[in-house]
Image: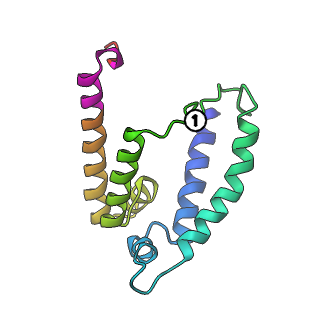
Amino acid sequence: MYSFLSLLAGAVFGLGLLVSGMANPAKVLGFLDLAGPWDPSLALVMAGAIAIASPAFGVAGRRPLSLMGQEMKLPSSRTVDRRLLAGSLLFGIGWGIAGFCPGPALVALGMGEAKALVFVVAMLVGMGAFELFERLGNPRNQKAV
């Protein structure tokens, strides 16, 4: 049941990305292009998501288990450090160049977009490189095989 509800939640999220146009890189780049014909629709989508997610995270933070009986795994760190800032910067650069972030890229990939395939492959390579550097830089982070 847990897997089915996870799949359902992902499908609803993907459908929301399609309906809002956020799986279209031109729409995202229109939002990021402040010097050109600016498209504020992404800001409205973000505001709607924040309005829905904020109370949900407030409730979730006070619960030990999810509605499905699973352990709540919310981030505990509130530290803004160089790693967070560097990762945010890299994310923003990639988003601005491609017009995709991970969720919409997967939706676009499912729709057969070639540009999304390039983005997803680059994203996976980046994730793999991060894991490799983490393991090389801190032996305590190595997972038992």
Amino acid type, mark 1? Ser
Question: In the image, residue 60 lies at what x, y percent?
Answer: 72, 37
Is disc 1 placed on a helix, strand or loop? helix
Count of numbered circles in the view? 1
Name the foreground residue: 80 vs 107: 80
Asked whether, in this view, residue 135 is left or right of residue 7, the answer is left
Q: Give left or right: position of 27 versus 49.
A: left
The question of residue 20 being in magenta is answered with no
Identify the residue at horizontal 61%, vertical 48% (top origin).
9
Give the position of the N terminus as an image quadrant.
Answer: top right
Name of the residue lying farthest toward the bottom: 37
Residue 143 vertical placement versus 17 (above, below): above
**Does 101 sit left or right of 45 as displayed?**
left
Residue 90 visible to the viewer:
yes
Task: Give the residue displayed 33% in from the left and 52% down from the top.
Answer: 90
The residue indicated by pointer 1 is 3
Left or right: where 106 falls relative to 139: right
- Point 74% across, 34% down: residue: 67
Q: Quadrant of the C terminus?
A: top left
Residue 136 on image: x %, y % = 23, 23
Q: Main secondary structure of the magenta part?
A: helix
- Along the viewing direction, whichever of 13 and 81 lies nearer the viewer: 81
The residue depicted at 29 percent of the width and 44 percent of the height is 124
Location of residue 37 by image quarter:
bottom left
The answer to whether residue 109 shows anywhere in this view is: no
Q: Callout 1: few (<14), some (14-19), or many (20+) C-alpha neighbours within 10 Å?
A: few
| Of residues 27 and 75, the one drawn nearer to the viewer in this rendering | 75
Is 122 drawn above or below residue 15 in the view shown?
above
Q: Is residue 32 above or below residue 120?
A: below
Relative to 83, residue 96 above or below = below
Look at the image and give the residue range highlighted in magenta: 131-141
| Color style of the picture | rainbow
